[in-house]
Amino acid sequence: MAIVTNYVTAQPPKWAENTVLVWSVFGALAIVSLGLFFWERRLAAEAPEAGVRPVPLGRIAVGGHSMNPPTVSARVRGREAELERIGGLVRGPGGGMVVVCGAGGLGKTTLAAEAAARARAEGRVAVWIRWRDDAEQLGQELAQAAHILGLPESRLEEARTGRVSLVDAVWEHLSDVTGWLIVVDNVDTPSRVGPGSGPPAAYRGWLRPHGGGVLLVTSRDTTRQTWGPDADVLHLQPLADDAGGAVLLDAAPRAGAEAGAEALAARLGGIPLGLNAAGTYLSVPTSRHRTFTAYQHALEAEFADLLGAEHPTAAADPEAARRVVRHTWDLSLDQLHRDGYTLARPVLQLLALLEPAPVPRTLIAPELVTDATGLPATAAGVDAALAGLHQYGLLHTPGADGSEPGSVAVGQLQLHPLVREVTAHTLTRPEPTDTWLTAIDEHLTRAVDAVAGMPGRTGWPTARLLAPHLPPLLQRIPHSDFTTTRDLLTDLADTLDVAGATAELHLLRQCVLDADTHHLGPNHPDTLHSRNNLGNALMALGRFQEAADLHQRNLTDHERVQGPEHLATLASCNNLGLALSGVGRFEEAADLHQRNLTDSERVLGRDHPATLTRRNNLANVLYRLGRHQEAADLHQQVLNDRERVLGPDHSKTLDSRGNLGNTLMALGRHQEAAHLHQQVLNDRERVLGPDHPQTLHDRSNLASVLHELGRHQEAADLHQQNLTDYERVLGPDHPQTLRGRNNLATARAAVARTQRWRLPWQRSRR
């Protein structure tokens, strides 16, 4: 049998036999242990805040990946203002936090990379951190960035042992160092940044505006509430056409000229991701479409293949999704869904099925969402969905921030055209599209019916917003329901006519005429009536030659189909006279109006409102022919009759009062004319509002008579106000706008002449 013994106990060392020595060593070790215990308790008591966890120093000091900014492969176009703003902060003494935000595809990362490259070119430290939805990792990387900028090991050791908070240690150091740029890219879930659960706007977490350099954050979250009052928020917008065209020319210089590139850039809505996709395609020698123009035309038939194609790895790889037009906005929608905004995606899809124009907020009601999608929807749920889409830059609210003066005073929603087009193309067909369109048509019809019945000016703003979305409704409507829907749209067009909404009026008049021609034929009385309405809409736009051609054709058809004395024929004759006057054919117009007035007096009577209108029109053309006294006498007669028949505040009565004022001015009776024009302007502003085209016309008349009275500065001020309003309401190229520009130049010249003619002491006194 083998006997195994313990070597240590079998042969103990000599000193172990000395009990005094052993107990002395044991006591010393016990004292040291107690000392270390109490020292650790003291360190814990001196920690700046309770519960601070130790941090593994190794992860701070050594990064697992490069922190160098990515290389920008092409010149950054159209972002000079933003780059200069960031560069100024980097170069300045104050530092701060800049948030570059906006919807996916706008080039936020590219802008940040270019800013970092410029900072490095100036000799500054630029560090790149990519947000990975991990607050702890962000903290480690910011600590590493601070270490690069000189944060001492001793301070990191204090964070490792829990004596200080790492986030405070990092930012205390970053506040003392100047001239750096740290980029944290793609912070699309800022609520998770941490540390802790506080919002970024509290500035107690990893993202703070208090450094000596610049912290640049890129994010799809665009809300000021998220980033707080001290952040410099740069909300990126799509590129202008010239900058977008330059991006395309940089990528594909042989694909065409500047004009073609800018046209394609406009078609793509200035979204850099779409521009880069198109430029990359055009730069490949084997691509089927090799020019900007060919690519733009191909989008109409091949959008799904060119920009709406799926990417095989995008669903599982967010970085791949960011680089693909079809998928980039899915990242935001997926995030909204995870955050509880379950209606965000279906609401976006509903908006994508409408036209690329602002939508009245009232149309996107819970009932529409439920009728279309079958999903339960509440007002609060729809509000939350729209707020989420707006927060991620997918939804624009025109005029809500006051940046668009003159925008209608009603809630509006608008998608970027490319977001809308991609979303519409990626809907499952034929369902849910057909079901959804049926619901949209029903709710559009209800909205039109409600607006057309509103009194006064109440419904005008919503009518303007609804108009662009109605032509597809009329095209989709079954033949059996055509007349009812057509009449409803005609009623809305009449509302737009009174409102002076010339562009929307023309759109509806054209679509109603097209539908009447298709359903009823070109010679049906309803079709002739619709053609007459379209001619009038063209005159409202200042397109008098087109209107004259249309009214001439219509008068011929009316006389053939309904006879020369039919009421519709008389109306058509009157409108042709107006169009001829608009193109300067005054003698022909006068003959036509005289004949029409004679027929109207015989058929309708002298006091019929239509007869009064034709007498007024004859007086106007006599004025244009220089027969001012005849015109004044006739206008005075019409004014008296209209005040008696229609009342003093009727729009036609106001027209007559203004027309009489013009003829009195031509006769040299300026003071009487000024009194009439001031009265008309006051009444028009009260009845139609200050921005109505007719109000602007009356203000121009008043300015003109003030000019004749020698009150040149007052005239110039009114003309300046009017020109600004003309450009906003009618557009820069409308004939009224052009006349307004000429009137202002004339008034300013008169003011300048008056200043030159004043004696020296008169000029100095002023």
Image: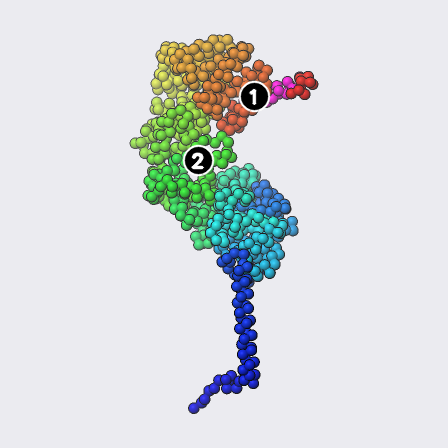
Q: Is residue 746 magenta?
A: yes
Three-letter amino acid code of the residue under disc 1: Asn
Classify mark 2: helix, strand or loop.
strand
Closest to the observer: 84 or 633? 84
**In the rendered image, the vertical position of residue 467 relative to residue 716, given as above or below:** below
Q: Which residues are magenta?
A: 739-757
Q: In the image, which disc is placed on residue 632?
A: none
* Quadrant in which the N terminus appears: bottom left
Kindly give the residue lying farthest to the bottom in the view shown: 1
Local packing at callout 1 (Cα closer than 10 Å; few below 14, some 14-19, many 20+) is many
**In the rendered image, the vertical position of residue 359 relative to residue 599, given as above or below:** below
Closest to the observer: 340 or 611? 340
**In the rendered image, the vertical position of residue 747 relative to residue 349, given as above or below:** above
Classify mark 1: helix, strand or loop.
helix
Nearer the camera: disc 1 or disc 2: 2
Read off the residue under disc 2: 412
Residue at 38% over, 43% down: 381
Residue at 55% over, 59% down: 46
Closest to the observer: 3 or 276? 3
- Which secondary structure class fits the magenta region best? helix
Local packing at callout 2 (Cα closer than 10 Å; few below 14, some 14-19, many 20+) is many
Three-letter amino acid code of the residue under disc 2: Gln
Q: Is residue 238 magenta?
A: no
x and y percentages locating residue 320 in the rendered image: 48, 52
Residue at 53% over, 67% down: 37
Read off the residue under disc 1: 743
* Quadrant in which the C terminus appears: top right
Q: Earlier in the sequence, mark 1 or mark 2?
A: 2
Instruction: Using residue 110 as the reference point, say whether residue 617 is left or right of it.
Output: left
